[in-house]
Amino acid sequence: MGKAWRKAWKKGAVLVLAVMMLLSAGACGTQGPDTAPVGDEGESADKSTADSNFNPTGLPIVNEPVTLRLMVRRPRLAKQSFEEREIYKKRSKDTNVNIQWEEIASSGFQEKVNLAINSGDLPDGIYAGGIQQHKFGEVIEAGLITPLDDYIQYAPNLKKLMELYPVVKKASTFEGDGKIYRYSGYNLKPFAAVAEPFFINSDWLENLGLEMPETTEELYTVLKAFKEKDANGNGDPNDEIPISFHLVGRNVTYRWMLASWDLLAMKTQADTTIRNGVLDFNPVNERYRSALEYFHRLYREGLMDPESITQDLPTINAKIYGDTQKIGVFSAWALKKGKHWDSYELLLPVEGPFGDRKMVHNHDTQITNGLIIFKDCKHPAALVRWVDHLNDGVNAIENWGGPEGLAWVRDEANKTWDIDYEGLEKKGRSFQEVRHSTATQNGPDMSKITEITGYEYVGFEKDPKMEWSNRHKPFFMEERWPVGDKIRLVTDRDREIALLWTDLQNHIRSFEAEAVINGMDDDKWNAHITQCEKLKYKEIVAYWQERYNEMTEED
């Protein structure tokens, strides 16, 4: 009796539910605020646009305020929270989109993002930050990220940016389904074409009556004089450091000088040089041996700082900018104003023993992380419109440089803008501190795109690095790794190559240090090549050759 009753009750419940569904389907098509209508092809339409609260154009973006939770990387020099920043208060007032900021220090940002993904406690999105590239594809495949293709129609500034620079769309697209999963910015920085140029102490050159060196042998002669002839003139011929590098955490500096041997060793390219589209593995090249023998000569004769292999950036800076001038040649991103500022002059690339006078051509554009939207966000279109509003005209400059008049000014007559360094100096503030405290570091940057802001940025030529980059142009190596790879799903082969490369790279770095400090002979060189072969360098280079071919064919 009880079982029969339960069976009848279930049948009745199913019938009532079916009737209710039919009635609701015919009830004038009304929907709740988060309900998505069914399109002609049975696919769900946008959750935001289904709500009459959302406005596809104009302001506010939503009629009634909505609050969305975003994770954001907190800039290192920030003195204000994002909630306190005036430009975001104004954007909230204009748009009715309020942001609940979850600020995370840079040092722990990726860890917190990974924790949110693994726990399922996802915010509405990530602003001015991203997911590690090797994990991004997996997170997309897991269905945790909302594709933006349906919402870009509400983002005219992003559409314009992708038309002007197709690489932005490419770098935001997942190769698995061809959809866009990231709102990206694009930072123009022509001053960065040379990353860490070399500088030479011109006071020491003048003190010793020496000319600017133009070859590796002339550089050797200058360094030897710096060491032996009391170049700083303080009466102590033993306190000069002719040349110094820093390798810890950066893996560059002296490696930039490898270009004088027509070698370019960059981590993302498995220590290869690109020649006519073909990747050449530097560490088995005879020119690489020649370069290491040169550096060993510097080290053996006391011309190279013995701490170069181990010292970090603060250590070498203390030597450069201390009370007594100690270093003759070094490489750096920039020179610090202040003590000894005028003592150093740009050292252009020197010609190597095979006739090569070259320099690594660093990338002078940057694709920046703007916005990633997670799957449970109830207002994706509103969020896309909000971030695009941050890049609407002059807003884009404020979003990068802070409120107008505080750190930057514009010339309305000439339609230009520039950083107000003079005004900042009077206020006793640095541009980076103001920017980190009032705007967004990196993020969806479009501030230098005149077609979007309506104003041309004229500050490039005032940057000392712009002059340094321009002077290096005749020496730049022609071929370099392409910018902007698609978002890829990491495969078993990718993981295998990464593990192989870790082992090979560890061997190479150990061999380099040993060769620079203790030198090498034919037996050591041949043993090194044999070890590279055992560690499958050919397989690794073949993998990167395939990746390079794919990226260049797509372009």
Image (tube, helix red, strand yellow):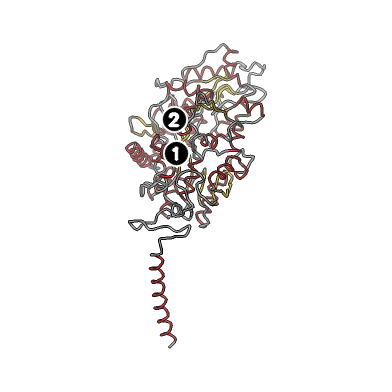
Q: Quadrant of residue 474?
A: top left
Indicate the position of residue 36 as horizontal and vertical percent values: 42, 57
In the picture provided, is 17 more to the left or to the right than 342? left
Q: Quadrant of residue 262?
A: top left
In the picture provided, is 237 more to the left or to the right than 128? right
Residue 43's disc is: none
Residue 157's disc is: 1
Q: Secondary structure at mark 2?
A: loop
Query: How many neighbours does mark 2 have within 10 angstroms: few (below 14), some (14-19), or many (20 or more)?
Result: few
- Can you say which quadrant of the picture contains the N terminus? bottom left
Looking at the image, residue 211 lies above or below residue 69: above
Looking at the image, residue 11 lies above or below residue 335: below
Circle 2 or circle 1, nearest the eye:
1
Task: Out of 352 and 142, give the one closest to the viewer.
Answer: 142
Disc tally is: 2
Indicate the position of residue 342 as horizontal and vertical percent values: 60, 19
Badge 2 is on which residue?
521
Q: What amino acid type is highlighted by mark number 2?
A: Asp
Q: What amino acid type is highlighted by mark number 1?
A: Asn
Instruction: Say which residue appears at 64% left-offset and 26% top-offset.
Output: 425
Query: Marks 2/1: CA distance?
Result: 59 Å
